[in-house]
Image: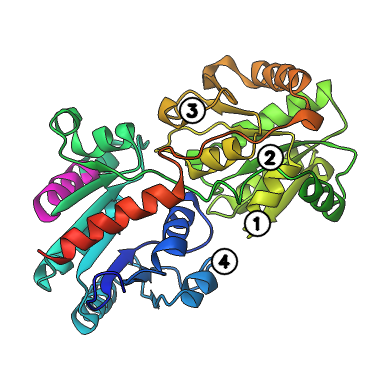
């Protein structure tokens, strides 16, 4: 241990560990921090074992599955309360404003360091959702001792512009192991052969199958692109609440043979090497880890203009408005692919910056270490 003391015990609150961007963010950091005097335990409300869960456990984490709040709110509160009381955590780290209950319980349990972490820059919804967000935001500000955000936009969205001006929140970048995501020609050949897509133009998307990620529009774009290049395939990596609806849309569009569903995967670096272009038409975002990974792999991408410009540290990303329509998006994909030479694809130099995990993990460790002394 670096400081000669017991481990810093941190409890993280999530929905699941199924390979989404926020979960991968935490896994990336813990891959470095578990070598230090830090213990990450995780509460999830999904009863199923997530694809990333074994990796956390292998690094020493305890993963607690509790009842979902909407299924049985009393059991959910009691289970989380007991976990906090029985395991003597130094820090509770809540991801997303809707995990505000964790801050309340941490305060009741006497846990001095309480983090709220914004990973979102905009969320749709009616009056009810906006009211809930406002209430949760007020509670987050009252109950948290430290405020984090994945980027400037995500921080302003939750904490307000004045909080940004006054430096009232800390940006914890969605850093990755840049070497792991480097483009490799041999990995490209291997994954394309394994998937049977050697002779295809591959449009890739790695995202939760949810309204936020806008797969309905993506399928419309791909259908238009097939008119320009029939020898193409769309690879969707991820699962989510709209899984069945998206599969039905694929059938209705009569593109079943051109869309490949891969669910959650542990070989994202290899998949990125195998893609020809990445498309992310999200309705709203915080700062997607996937786009950091995409740039590290030297992969061209087209994304919606709702995605923060903060993530664009290379010239690989092209931003388009959704209201331009599927046909325009398809044309831009075709144009970008004509100018991108896969054989000349190079790794982008991103070391030493805000997305370099070796640097950013040390920064987060220093933050945790200072909190332990509260």
Disc tally is 4
Mark with earlier residue (1, 3): 1
Q: Nearer the viewer, residue 14 or 365?
A: 365
- Residue 226 located left or right of residue 117: right
Direction right: furthest residue: 199
Q: Secondary structure at mark 2?
A: strand
Say which residue appears at 68% left-offset and 27% top-offset. 221
**Dominant SS in magenta:** helix
Mark with earlier residue (1, 2): 2
- Please name which of the two marks, 1 or 3, marks the residue nearer to the observer: 3
Dot 1: few (<14), some (14–19), or many (≥20) neighbours within 10 Å?
some
Mark with earlier residue (3, 4): 4
Q: Quadrant of the C terminus?
A: bottom left
Residue picked out by circle 3:
312
Mark with earlier residue (4, 2): 4
Say which residue appears at 56% left-offset and 43% top-offset. 293
Tell me where the magenta segment starts and ends, as one range: 132-144
Q: Secondary structure at mark 3?
A: loop
Residue picked out by circle 2:
204
Q: Is residue 296 above or below residue 338?
A: below
The answer to whether residue 289 is seen in the rendering is: yes
Q: Secondary structure at mark 4?
A: loop
Q: Nearer the viewer, residue 77 or 366?
A: 366
Residue 33: x percent and y percent? 39, 64
Residue picked out by circle 1:
263
Q: Nearer the viewer, residue 81 or 135?
A: 81
Residue picked out by circle 4:
51
Asked if the residue at tag 3 contacts the one at tag 1, i.e. Cβ–Cβ closer than 8 Å, the answer is no
């Amino acid at each position: 241990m670096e400081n000669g003391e017991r481990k810093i015990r941190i409890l993280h609150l999530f929905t699941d560990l199924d390979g989404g961007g926020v979960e991968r963010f935490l896994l990336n950091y813990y891959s470095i921090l578990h070598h230090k005097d830090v213990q990450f335990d995780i509460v999830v409300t999904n009863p199923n074992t997530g694809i990333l869960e074994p990796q956390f456990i292998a690094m020493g984490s305890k993963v607690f599955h509790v009842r979902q709040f909407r299924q049985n709110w009393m059991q959910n509160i009691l289970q989380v309360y007991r976990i906090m009381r029985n395991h003597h955590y130094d820090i509770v780290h809540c991801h997303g404003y809707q995990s505000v209950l964790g801050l309340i319980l941490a305060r009741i349990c006497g846990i001095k360091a309480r983090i709220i972490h914004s990973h979102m820059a905009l969320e749709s919804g009616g009056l009810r959702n906006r009211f809930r967000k406002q209430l949760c935001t007020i509670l987050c500000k009252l109950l948290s001792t430290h405020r984090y955000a994945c980027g400037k936009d995500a921080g302003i969205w939750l904490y307000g512009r004045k909080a940004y001006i006054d430096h009232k929140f800390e940006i914890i970048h969605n850093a990755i192991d840049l070497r792991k995501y480097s483009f490799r020609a041999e990995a490209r050949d291997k994954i394309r052969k394994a998937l049977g897509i050697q002779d295809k133009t591959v449009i890739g998307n790695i995202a939760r199958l949810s309204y936020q990620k806008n797969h309905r529009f993506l399928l419309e774009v791909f259908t238009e692109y097939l008119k320009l290049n029939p020898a193409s395939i769309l690879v969707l990596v991820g699962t989510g609440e709209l899984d069945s609806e998206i599969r039905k849309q694929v059938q209705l569009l009569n593109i079943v043979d051109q869309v490949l569903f891969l669910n959650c995967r542990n070989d994202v670096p290899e998949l990125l090497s195998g893609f020809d272009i990445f498309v992310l038409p999200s309705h709203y975002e915080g700062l997607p880890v996937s786009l950091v990974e995409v740039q590290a792999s030297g992969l061209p991408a087209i994304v919606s203009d709702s995605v923060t410009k903060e993530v664009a540290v290379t010239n690989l990303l092209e931003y388009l408005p959704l209201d331009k329509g599927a046909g325009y998006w398809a044309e831009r994909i075709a144009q970008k692919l004509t100018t991108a030479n896969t054989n000349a694809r190079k790794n982008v130099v991103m070391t030493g910056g805000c997305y370099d995990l070796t640097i950013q993990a040390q920064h987060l460790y220093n933050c945790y270490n200072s909190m332990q002394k509260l």
